[in-house]
Image (spheres, grey):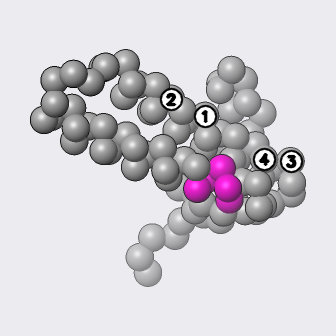
Amino acid sequence: WIDGYEKKLPRLKNFILPGGSPGAAQLHLARTVCRRAERLLVRAMRTELAINAQILPYLNRLSDLLFVLARFENMKAGGIEEVWRGKS
């Protein structure tokens, strides 16, 4: 499903900055929250034994989905994907 949407998008050659259309920006924000949850889960898994190991791949794939949906939404809305230029 994710791969199907990804095939409709231009191939990425550089990192892109979150943002674009309002809908895409919200999806990028949701992705950052998902990534934060993923990092917190990894930290918790190092200290607690009773955490379901299937949660981590789920969060990772959810983050992938949110990224692809943000790019797709941006494309549909005519938004611009801003390329990260790095330090100048």
Mark 1 = which residue? Answer: 65
**From where the camera sits, is residue 10 visible?**
no
Q: Earlier in the sequence, mark 3 or mark 2?
A: 2
| Mark 1–mark 4 CB contact (< 8 Å) | no
- Residue at the extreme right of the image, as rendered: 77
| Mark 3–mark 4 CB contact (< 8 Å) | yes
Q: Amino acid at mark 2?
A: Arg
Dot 3, how many residues are within 10 Å of its Cα: few (below 14), some (14-19), or many (20+)?
Answer: few
Mark 4 = which residue? Answer: 73
- Find residue 39 and report its horizontal and vertical position in percent: 32, 44
Q: Amino acid at mark 3?
A: Lys
Mark 3 = which residue? Answer: 76
Q: Amino acid at mark 4?
A: Glu
Q: Which residues are magenta?
A: 25-29
Q: Is residue 16 left or right of residue 40?
A: right
Q: Nearer the viewer, mark 1 or mark 3?
A: 1
In this picture, is 20 found above or below 60? below
Name the one closer to the observer, 85 or 21: 21
Dot 2, how many residues are within 10 Å of its Cα: few (below 14), some (14-19), or many (20+)?
Answer: few
| Mark 3–mark 2 CB contact (< 8 Å) | no
Q: Residue at x 66, y 50 (%)?
A: 27
Residue 40 badge:
none
- Find residue 12 and report its horizontal and vertical position in percent: 61, 46
Q: Is residue 55 left or right of residue 75?
A: left
If the image is split into quadrants, where does the N terminus sit?
A: top right
If the image is split into quadrants, where does the C terminus sit?
A: bottom left
